[in-house]
Amino acid sequence: MGILLFIHILVTLFLIGIVLIQKNDGGSSLFASGGSSSSMFNARGTSNMLTKVTWFLASIFLIDCVLMAYLASSDIKKEETVVEKPVE
């Protein structure tokens, strides 16, 4: 569970960074000012690349959330409740 939590925190930080870098409604972004002629680093190419990275990180985030919830629920089922404990 500790490894999944570490991955979750790491993906969350990367996801926050990628979302902050993306183009806002005003048409400007933090790093993508477009001056290069290649399609990967112009305004539209960077937007597409950042969108794909965002979807990838969001997918990993969602899968990690579901996996951690499943593991946490299976740990809860293993514990005895007060009702199940024998009376001394």
Image: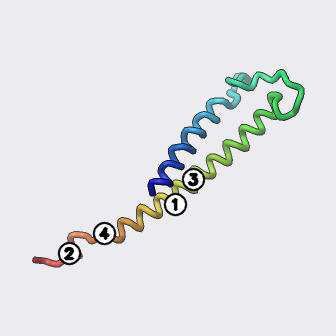
* Mark number, residue 85: 2
Q: Earlier in the sequence, mark 3 or mark 2?
A: 3
* Mark number, residue 48: none
Q: Dot 2, how many residues are within 10 Å of its Cα: few (below 14), some (14-19), or many (20+)? A: few
Residue at horizontal 45 percent and vertical 63 percent from the top: 71
Q: For the residue labelled by badge 3, is the local secondary structure a helix, a strand or a loop?
A: helix
Mark 2–mark 4 distance (CA, rounded to whole Å): 10 Å
Mark 4–mark 1 distance (CA, rounded to whole Å): 19 Å
Mark 1–mark 3 distance (CA, rounded to whole Å): 9 Å
Q: Earlier in the sequence, mark 2 or mark 1?
A: 1
- Along the horizontal axis of the image, is 36 left or right of 57? right
Q: Quadrant of the C terminus?
A: bottom left
Q: Earlier in the sequence, mark 4 or mark 3?
A: 3
- Along the horizontal axis of the image, is 39 left or right of 13? right
Q: For the residue labelled by badge 1, is the local secondary structure a helix, a strand or a loop?
A: helix
Residue assigned mark 3: 62
Q: Earlier in the sequence, mark 1 or mark 3?
A: 3
Q: Nearer the viewer, residue 9 or 82?
A: 9
Q: For the residue labelled by badge 4, is the local secondary structure a helix, a strand or a loop?
A: loop
x and y percent of residue 24 in the render?
68, 27
Mark 4–mark 3 distance (CA, rounded to whole Å): 27 Å
Q: Dot 3, how many residues are within 10 Å of its Cα: few (below 14), some (14-19), or many (20+)? A: few
Contact check, label 4 and label 3, Cβ < 8 Å = no
Residue at horizontal 52 percent and vertical 58 percent from the top: 66
Residue assigned mark 1: 67
Q: Dot 1, how many residues are within 10 Å of its Cα: few (below 14), some (14-19), or many (20+)? A: some
Residue assigned mark 4: 79
From this view, report whether residue 31 is shown above or below residue 73: above
